Amino acid sequence: MKKKIFIGLTLIMIFFNNNSNANYEKKFFDHKIKSISGEIIDLKDFENKVILLVNTASYCGFTNQYNDLQKLWDDYKSKGLIVLGVPSNSFNQEKKGDSEIKEFCEVNFQIDFPMTTITDVKGNDAHEIFKWAKKNHGNSAVPKWNFHKILINKEGEIYETFSSFTKPTSNKIVSKIEKLL
């Protein structure tokens, strides 16, 4: 009986270990993405920084997490943290244009961390960053909803992912950021 339980638990652990195949032919820093203002963000500029990549939306129940994301940015940017907001309409909760989103974020949340243009984050049309994340970290890196968080270490590899329910300033996230910095 104990042997069957052990084998069962081992199989479950193997099945749910999504990042065991991470070979990182490319790193996070090997990508580019368009900013909310229209310039290209070369992620090489973020090398040797810790990145918190977050898909965002203006009309979501988690939109108030912008306050916590800005607080993280304010508290840790001088220590090497980059908060990168990725507005997405993948869950049909985002404004129609980049300028509307930019104004919404600046007026309502005083956001000044880097943000991208509206970007698909799941499925065949997902931006290469999110396809890269899935390839190297498995399904836990695929956003299930808005304000999904992907923590990337200084080497450009995914360290951990967090669901929408995990607040950006939670001890769970902050302790990992501090460890990586």
Image (cartoon, grey):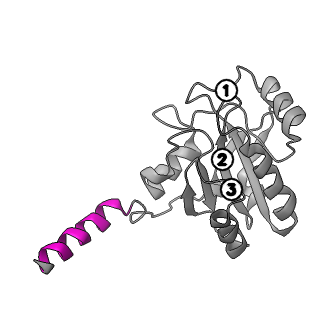
Q: Which residues are magenta?
A: 3-17
Relative horizontal placement of residue 127, taking residue 112 as reference (left or right): left
The kind of residue tagged 1 is Glu
Q: Any magenta on residue 41?
A: no
Spatial CA distance of label 1 from label 2 is 14 Å
Up/down of 110 relative to 25, above or below: above
Q: Mark 1 vs mark 2: which is more N-terminal?
A: 2
Task: Mark yes or no: residue 154 visible.
Answer: no
Tell me how many marks there are.
3
| Residue topped by disc 2 | 54
Secondary element type, mark 2: strand
State the residue position of label 1: 94
Whole-Å distance between the Cαs marked 1 and 3?
A: 20 Å
Mark 2 → mark 3, Cα distance in angstroms: 6 Å
- In percent of width and height, residue 135 lies at 45, 52
Q: Identify which amino acid the numbered label 3 is placed on.
A: Leu
Q: Quadrant of residue 150?
A: bottom right
Q: Earlier in the sequence, mark 1 or mark 3?
A: 3
Q: Which numbered circle lies on residue 147?
A: none
Most distant residue in the left direction: 1
Secondary structure beneath disc 3?
Answer: strand
At a point 74% along the width and 65% down the height, the residue shown is: 49
Whole-percent x and y of residue 40? 77, 40
Which residue is label 3 attached to? 52
Q: Residue at left 77%, top 51%?
A: 68
